[in-house]
Amino acid sequence: MRSNWQKWAYWGALIIIVAGIFSVYLVATAPRRNAESQAINVAEKTASLTTPQTFFMFQRDETYYTVGGKTKDGQSVFVIINARSGRTHTVSAGAGLSATQAQNRARQISGQQQVEKTVLGWYRGAVTWEVTLRSHSGNYQYVLLNYRTGKTV
């Protein structure tokens, strides 16, 4: 039978390990949380966004943050923000493909594959959906679709 100090040492070590894992997680996710918070602030100021609902991080030639939500008028919009320059583009959520439509279109183009992630951003002068797909063999494929037309970029 274990002595009392061994039980305390066991539980103490376990608490330290769990706290360490949690601390590493918080440090590792801090940049994304900070970027999301700043992007929401920019979207609230530039597009009068009152209800942020989605956040995307789009990385191609440059990094863009996209915040989706509703404005004071109740209109659903996406605010796309260049991470380096701070330049913004605001588009109506109804002016192009929805995320589900983009996923379905990407599946059509690439065959039946599992969708891993869908993000909205700015690429080559246009609003673009990036759909990440994974095949049954585990290979990844990226399909870029023009937000307004649904054509591949």
Image (tube, rainbow, N blue to C red):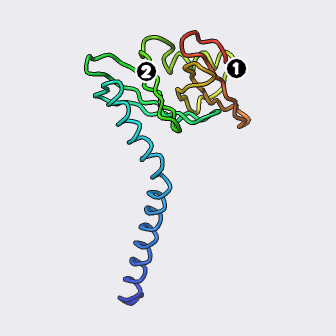
- Which residue is drawn at the image coordinates 45% and 52% (left, top)? 30
Q: x, y percentage for residue 11?
A: 39, 77
Q: x, y percentage for residue 59?
A: 59, 35
- Which residue is drawn at the image coordinates 41% and 15% (left, top)? 92
The image quadrant of residue 109 is top right
**SS at mark 1?**
loop
Quarter of the figure with the C terminus = top right
Left or right side of 91 for 104: right
State whether residue 129 is above or below residue 86. Answer: above
Outermost residue to the left: 72
Contact (Cβ within 8 Å) of mark 2 with mark 1: no
State whether residue 90 is above or below residue 1. Answer: above
Q: x, y percentage for residue 9?
A: 41, 83
Residue position for label 2:
90
User: Mark 2, mark 1: which one is toward the viewer?
Assistant: 2
**SS at mark 2?**
strand
State whether residue 2 is above or below residue 95. Answer: below
Q: Residues within 10 Å of mark 2 (few under 14, many from 20)?
A: some
Quarter of the figure with the N terminus = bottom left
The image quadrant of residue 4 is bottom left
Frontmost residue, 129 versus 43:
43
Residue position for label 1:
111
Q: Residues within 10 Å of mark 1 (few under 14, many from 20)?
A: few
| Amino acid bearing label 2 | Thr
- Which residue is drawn at the image coordinates 55% and 16% (left, top)? 147
Left or right side of 120 for 70: left
Q: x, y percentage for residue 20?
A: 46, 68
Disc 2/disc 1 C-alpha distance (Å): 32 Å
Frontmost residue, 81 versus 57:
81
Q: Which mark is residue 62?
A: none
| Mark closest to the chain's N terminus, 2 or 1 | 2
| Amino acid bearing label 1 | Gly
